[in-house]
Amino acid sequence: MGTLTAFNRPSLEDNTAHKAITLERHEAPSFIGVSPQGVHLVLRNLHAPSQLGYHAYPHTMSNEDKSLTDSLRNAILQALLGSQDLDNVLLIMKNLDYEAKLDLIDSVWALLDSESGGGGAARWMVEYIQVVLLIDRSSSDKALSHPNRSATALNLLSLPVAKSALSECHGKDHEASYHPDTFWPLSEMCGWIIEFTESILSAASQFYYSVPSDSATRTIDPALLVFLNQSLVSTWVDSLGYTLRFVKHVDVPKGTSIDSKTLVTRSVEDTLSQSPVNVSLLLEALKGLKIEAPISAADWRNSYRHLILPERLVKVAKDIMSQVLKPDVVSLLPLHVRMARLHLIPDEHATVERDIITKKPIADGDWPPPLGSGATCRRCRGKTMIDFSRSPSTSRWRLWELSFERCICGGRWKPYNGPN
């Protein structure tokens, strides 16, 4: 038994009349519609439903029958184009099994490929990662849902977040300094960028130097797919560039103690100097990447979904990695010795849990936070120490924090109000 929101009297003139209904196990909605108010289910037969913008609900679709109707694809597509909550997309697919949901999403993005900008456009790539993450998180079969992909998804979604923090908290002029209240928070963000970089290069080196198999495909760590996506590479390059600029441009107003500047600068400089990666040379290598055979958005999504690379893409990936995995760019042995996989959501392999937004490490004594501050994501269960209840200030960092009305995965926040 469950409660769903449905139209009371669906019509073109009045599309806001809702009521909450309780469905028994033997009941199922007949039609589904998408409007600016959300996804709506209807329990009755409708006259000319297509004219009202409704599509048949797939409650009759069995696990054995994976055929995806045009009406169902169109319902998903309209939800995406209308910037609907992605939870509504999951509701549309509620009665499909895990693989059928992924098949449906792939067919929707195939339609987007034909649109201006294509399914490989930055916006659609982010939303594809978010939808797959949502499907993985909602799956009851953990063997199918690829926990490693979920962890990587949060890192990929965090990359533009890190870039925005370092760019938006900088001075208005190109050479302006960072404000003192951003020093420590941004140093944590720089530390995460280096960890992210090390994790990608570690996975890349293991793939590049592994013994070739006789199979026509290769199983991969999803982090490798950063190299095969120009949008992700560009954001990665920008984040590394901002990290180097942060060290150079940290400054303190006249009459202020320089202790804070010194500590922050040394913190980030130590992270850079202790890393097996020469960030400056890596930045040059990434900027000069030559990709003779760029892969399509559809190929990238297929590899991300199945975590495999066909032989033709293995050659492309290795050619790209050969331009980066050079002795002067990364010292592989020290990298593998010190490398510990760091996840935003803790699991049996994690050593550090970080704030899902600010990337500040969450120590044992930091969580649970004081009542009324901090929140967890209802979708990915990521934690943040941001206090959304406090009024905004003129602080650039504070304004940046409050811009995250939702989690990086698109989920809604659940304020921490004490143990349940």
Image (cartoon, rainbow, N blue to C red):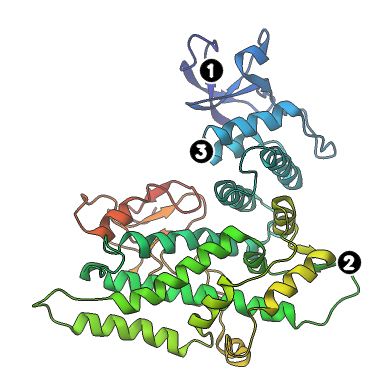
Q: Residues at badges 3 and 1 in contact (C-beta under 8 Å)?
A: no
Q: Residue 293's x, y, as percent? A: 75, 62
Q: Which mark is residue 85?
A: 3
Tell me: residue 2, above or below residue 203. Answer: above
| Amino acid tagged 1 | Phe
Q: Secondary structure at mark 2?
A: loop
Which of the image's four quarters has the N terminus? top right
* SS at mark 1 in the image: strand
Mark 2: few/some/many CA within 10 Å (<14, 14-19, 20+): few
Name the residue: 82% across, 35% down. Answer: 67
Viewer-side residue, 144 vs 316: 316
Q: Tell me where residue 88 appears, x and y as whole percent.
A: 56, 35
Determine whether the residue tagged by mark 3 lies in a helix, strand or loop.
loop
Q: Which residue is mark 2?
A: 216
* Marks 2 and 3, how far apart at CA: 39 Å
**Residue at the image point whose x is 73% and y is 77% from the top:** 207
Q: Residues within 10 Å of mark 3 (few under 14, many from 20)?
A: some
Measuring 66% from the left and 39% from the top, which residue is drawn there? 112
Q: CA distance from mark 2 to mark 1?
A: 51 Å
N-terminal of the pair, mark 2 or mark 3, is 3
Mark 1 lies on residue: 7
**What amino acid is found at the position of numbered circle 3 in the picture?**
Asp
Q: Nearer the viewer, mark 2 or mark 3?
A: 2
Q: Is residue 239 among what the camera can see?
A: yes
In the figure, is residue 36 to the left or right of 290?
Answer: left
Is 284 left, or right, of 246 in this rendering?
right
Is 3 located above or below residue 144 in the figure? above
Q: Where does the image place residue 234, in percent across and percent down from the top left?
A: 54, 63
Q: Is residue 347 left or right of residue 171?
A: right
